[in-house]
Image (cartoon, grey):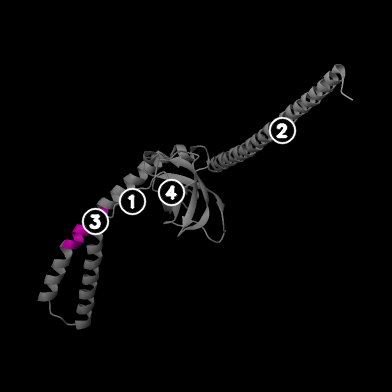
Amino acid sequence: MPLSFNSALASGLLLLGVFGSTAVAQDEVKGVVELERENRLLKLQVDNLSVSLGAALAREETKTASLKDVKQHLALFGKDFFEDGDTRLRHAVSDYQVARENLTELENATFDLIPAIRNYLRTAVASDPEARSDVEVKIRELEVALGQRQQPKRKIEQGTAQEARIVTIDSNTGLVVVNAGRDADLNVGMRFRIERSGTHIGDAIVATTRPDVSGLLMQSLVNQDNQVRPGDTAKLILNN
């Protein structure tokens, strides 16, 4: 039996309603999926920020601990420990210059003495050949020693802010002196990794600087039985 016009119209409206509901439902599903995706991205960003914040806090904690070590060291040796460093350095240089002048005078006098002794031995009556031989041996040894002293001094290699070399360790204060200073852009608070032939010995922090040298305080040692030595390498720790 053919459908009446009203029945056909009702059926059409019903189909339109079904299709419309389906389209709305699909749009809602897409919206939920998009929101979930954005939520995952936001969560990932929050996690990354948390990791970055944690790393920053850890670095700040390390800096604080390093500065605390420096303050404790200053308290232990007195506030003028570093302030008088320039004065002590000038005195040390002055003492060295005086000692060097005295040594030069001694060397010159010895150079003049050796030919005189040789001339005397040639003219003197040798009553004791062994004694004469001993004197000649000592003269040769002295000439060798003086020859070594007269060799040009090797120029001290200068390090950089990225890598320097330990030249000495102060026995009184424990300061590790490296061959790089303010002229190489070293600043108080910079941290260095101490190595020997690629092996990690320990970590240190710059406590004082001069134009061409700096004093480092050891913060840690990998092995207490393996202390820092002159000749070890100090490499800048980038994550300061």
Nearer-the-camera pick, 199 or 92: 199
Q: Callout 1: few (<14), some (14-19), or many (20+) C-alpha neighbours within 10 Å?
A: few
Which badge, 2 or 4, comes first in the chain's sequence? 2
Examine the residues drawn in magenta and state their main secondary structure. helix
Q: Is residue 146 left or right of residue 30?
A: left
Which residue is label 4 attached to? 177
Q: Callout 3: few (<14), some (14-19), or many (20+) C-alpha neighbours within 10 Å?
A: few
Residue 68 to residue 225: above or below: above
Do the residues under discs 3 and 2 have CB atoms within 8 angstroms? no
Which badge, 1 or 2, comes first in the chain's sequence? 2
Q: Quadrant of the N terminus?
A: top right
Residue drawn 42% across the image and 45% down it? 162
Nearer-the-camera pick, 142 or 187: 187
Which badge, 3 or 2, comes first in the chain's sequence? 2
Q: How far apart are the two marked residues, 1 and 4, measured between alpha carbons?
A: 13 Å
Q: Is residue 111 left or right of residue 65?
A: left
Q: Position of residue 152 (x, y in %)?
A: 24, 56
Q: How far apart are the two marked residues, 3 and 2, measured between alpha carbons?
A: 80 Å
